[in-house]
Amino acid sequence: MYEHALAANVWKLQVIRIIRWFVLILPVIVPFYQENGLSMTRILVLQSVFSLAAAFGAGGLFFAVLGACSLIGLVRSWAQEKIRYRKEAGIPEPAAAG
């Protein structure tokens, strides 16, 4: 039983390792996203979603309750609703910093 618990934690350690590398890549990836047309607002939303997923994913509670697919669907529907609202209200898209 003890070996099974240790083996179950291996993938969690790999996720934490990937997250640590992502933090090192952030200073490079922000200008990359800006070059490809993302506004700073969208970049920060993307980073905050990633941070929330990483924080809740480390404990496993968030993904155990909602599941990764539900989280992706939730973020997608939120983004689509925000875009629809902006178009209906006539709010222009924020200009990319640059």
Image (cartoon, helix red, strand yellow):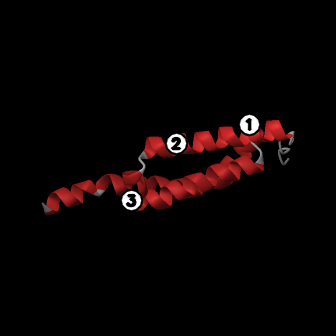
Q: Nearer the viewer, mark 1 or mark 3?
A: 1
How far apart marks 1 and 2 lie (CA) works out to: 18 Å
Q: Which residue is mark 3?
A: 61
**Numbered disc 3: secondary structure:** helix
What residue would you read off at disc 2? 72
Number of other residues with Cα within 10 Å of mark 1, as a class: few under 14, some 14 to 19, many 20 or more: few
Relative to 65, 52 lies left or right:
right
Position above or below: 59 against 88: below
The kind of residue on which mark 1 rests is Arg
Bin the neighbour count of mark 3 within 10 Å (Cα to Cα): few under 14, some 14-19, many 20 and up.
few
- The mark closer to the camera, 1 or 2, is 1
- Mark 2 Cα within 10 Å, few/some/many (few <14, many 20+)? few
Compared across the picture, whether 82 is left or right of 19 comes to right
Residue 56 in the image, given as x and y percentages of width and height: 46, 60
Q: Earlier in the sequence, mark 1 or mark 2?
A: 2
Instruction: Identify which residue is drawn at 23% across, 55% down.
Output: 7
